[in-house]
């Protein structure tokens, strides 16, 4: 496989670092660095019709969710736009971070996707109370996409197992390649986080307070205070409900990595954190866990979804039961901070796991090695 001409297709704007936490952008940068010259094909027009709106309204009355973007009509509309743009240049490979734009694509070019989940694992997990029509459409879309792919990459074994079990994809067509931390510049190896200075600094980075377990994070913070451990809590990316307030809790509703002052603030928060906590109820992967490890910050996170692909107990943090309480998290933190030497070792091994696995260069090299054999 030489340096390929790659059409990077996505429904969204692949140059936007804020779309899907920057995931589509950083996947594209990785493909461009390790696979070939990338041409963006994105910003696709949708075709949400009056009929789709009626269906959405109807299913809402039934207390069910309808996904217009998963319909065959929408998939075909996206595919025709992509096919038109593919004719304007010569390409060797189509690469996508999603099944939606390629499910109905008519092409002789090999297609590769890199995903964090299948539709099947999202049903009754991320997607709650889906109508039967959308479940059928979503599974058909993924099934069509996987059949068209020359190779399918997943960020976790959790997602890869679903591809085999739910869509009967042959295992030889699948590779688990973890995503990396979404940084343009890799942080310096050492920060202040290993000093265990008081107050203890807890960090919670999430766009969805409820789904990401914000209440459990707040309970952890209060439990530590009640145990006599002075603690600060920094919340980034969301605004907690009004009942979750405290003098030693500070909220940054949104920090844009594209803005220097925001990026500097986020850098400071990571550098000074002692732990990042992510007690998610549902989580396909958990990019902020990779970001924390880049700073040598250990993580405590729910044992759910794709998180176990990132977190190794005693190496870069610990997995907690999905029903763990804030008091459970607090007791774990107390256990870790009692032994400063062990905590410092945990910080160092957290950064080592980032250096070896949880970065885009590691992912890109693995992707290149895999495609060398398959494309």
Image (spheres, grey):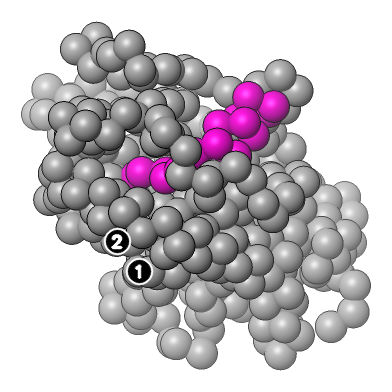
Q: Nearer the viewer, residue 79 or 266?
A: 266
Residue 42: x %, y % from top left: 69, 41
* Disc 2 packing (10 Å; few <14; some 14–19; many ≥20): many
Judge left or right: residue 349 versus residue 337: right
Q: Is residue 7 magenta?
A: no
Judge whether 217 appears above or below 274 on screen. Answer: above
Judge left or right: residue 354 versus residue 41: left
* Disc 1 packing (10 Å; few <14; some 14–19; many ≥20): some
Q: Secondary structure at mark 2?
A: strand
| Image disc number at residue 319 | 2
Q: Nearer the viewer, residue 326 or 59?
A: 326
**Part of the protein shown in magenta:** 263-278
Q: Nearer the viewer, residue 15 or 155?
A: 155
Earlier residue among tags 2 and 1: 1
Compute the Cα span from label 2 to label 1.
6 Å
Residue 268: x %, y % from top left: 62, 31
Q: Residue furthest left?
A: 62
The image quadrant that residue 62 belongs to is top left
Residue 265: x %, y % from top left: 63, 24
Q: Secondary structure at mark 1?
A: loop
Res 138 seen here: no
Residue bearing the label numbered 1: 313
Kindly identify the residue that appears in the image at 53 percent across and 79 percent down: 175
Look at the image and tell me in which quarter the N terminus lies. bottom right
């Amino acid at each position: 496989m030489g340096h390929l001409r790659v059409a990077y297709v996505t429904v969204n704007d692949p140059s936007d670092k804020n779309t899907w936490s920057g995931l589509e952008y950083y996947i594209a940068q990785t493909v461009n660095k390790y696979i070939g010259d990338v041409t963006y094909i994105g910003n696709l027009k949708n075709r949400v019709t009056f009929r789709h709106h009626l269906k959405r309204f109807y299913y809402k009355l039934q207390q069910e969710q309808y996904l217009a973007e998963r319909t065959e009509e929408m998939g075909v509309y996206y595919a025709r736009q992509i096919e038109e743009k593919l004719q304007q240049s010569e390409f060797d490979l189509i690469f996508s971070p999603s099944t939606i734009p390629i499910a109905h694509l008519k092409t002789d070019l090999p297609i590769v996707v890199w995903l964090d989940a299948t539709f099947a694992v999202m049903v009754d997990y991320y997607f709650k109370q889906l109508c039967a029509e959308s479940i059928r459409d979503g599974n058909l879309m993924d099934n069509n996409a996987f059949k068209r792919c020359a190779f399918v990459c997943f960020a976790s074994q959790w997602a890869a197992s679903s591809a085999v079990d739910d869509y009967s994809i042959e295992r030889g067509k699948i590779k688990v390649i973890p995503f990396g931390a979404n940084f343009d510049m890799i942080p310096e190896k050492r920060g202040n986080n290993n000093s265990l200075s008081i107050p203890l600094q807890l960090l919670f980075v999430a766009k969805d307070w409820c789904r990401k377990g914000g209440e459990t994070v707040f309970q952890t913070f209060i439990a530590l205070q009640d145990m006599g451990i002075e603690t600060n809590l920094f919340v980034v990316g969301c605004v907690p409900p009004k009942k979750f307030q405290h003098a030693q809790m500070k909220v940054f509703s949104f920090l844009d990595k594209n803005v220097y002052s925001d990026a500097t603030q986020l850098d400071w928060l990571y550098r000074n954190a002692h732990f990042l906590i992510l007690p998610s109820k549902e989580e396909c992967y958990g990019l902020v866990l990779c970001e924390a490890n880049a700073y040598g910050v250990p993580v405590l996170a729910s044992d759910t979804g794709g998180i176990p692909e990132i977190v190794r107990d005693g190496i870069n943090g610990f997995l907690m039961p999905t029903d763990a309480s804030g008091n459970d998290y607090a007791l774990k933190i107390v256990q870790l901070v009692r032994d400063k030497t062990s905590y410092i070792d945990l910080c160092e091994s957290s950064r080592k796991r980032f250096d070896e696995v949880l970065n885009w260069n590691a992912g890109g090299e693995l992707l290149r090695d895999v495609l060398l054999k398959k494309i």
